[in-house]
Structure formats: C-alpha cells, structure tokens
Amino acid sequence: MTTAVTKQDKVLNYLTRGRTLSQTSAESMFAVGNLRATISDIKPTLKKMGYRVERLTGRSGETRYAALKTSNRKR
C-alpha cells in the first residue's frame, strides 16, 4: 500500500530544497489555493526538522515563502 503525497507534503519538500514559493507558483505547481494557510499548517513540521519560515518580497512585490535552516549557535 502506498501513501498519497499531499499538497502540504509537496510544499514542504519544495521549500526544504532551498527554493522559495509564491501563491501563484503554489497554485500552478501544486494546486494550493491558500498558500498562507498551508504554510501555517506545515510550520510545526518544519520547526521539528530544524527550519524556520521566512516571508520575503519577490521582484514584482509578491509575497514569497522560504524555509531556512535554523542555526544551532547559542547567543
């Protein structure tokens, strides 16, 4: 029995490869209608994996999301 890959899984895998994602890209690539909600849903998983979510502004002013590795440094 195989497990279906969810839209959340696809977004998570995409972001953890060092890529950024906008709402328009998420819609066309993964059929995600509300990227902000999807990011909110996967944030706890990303945190457990050692990532933090960054919200960036793209070249044309669109909001983009990235998953960045957190540093283990103590301040």
Image (cartoon, rainbow, N blue to C red):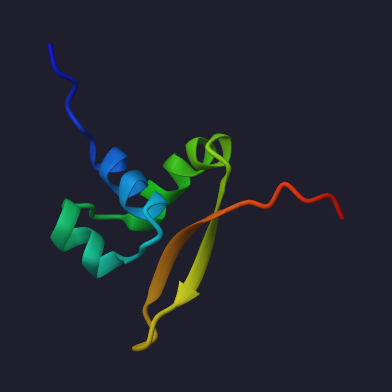
- Image-based side of 63 in relation to 24, left or right: right
Of 31 and 18, the residue lying toward us? 18
User: Which quadrant of the figure has residue 33?
Assistant: bottom left
Q: Residue at x 39, y 81 (%)?
A: 58
Residue 53, position as x, y percentages in the image: 53, 56
Q: Compared to 38, does 54 lie above or below?
A: below
Seen in the picture, residue 63 relative to 45 is either above or below; the reply is below
Residue lying at the far top in this picture: please name it: 1
Quadrant assignment, res 48: top right
* Left or right of 50, for residue 11: left
Q: Position of residue 34 (x, y in %)?
A: 30, 55
Query: Residue sitting at 72 percent across and 46 percent down?
Result: 72
Give the quarter of the figure containing the N terminus: top left
The quadrant of the picture occupied by the C terminus is bottom right
Image x and y of residue 45, in percent: 49, 36
Q: Residue furthest right?
A: 75
Task: Specify the farthest residue to the bottom.
Answer: 60
Q: Name the residue: 20% across, 32% down.
A: 5
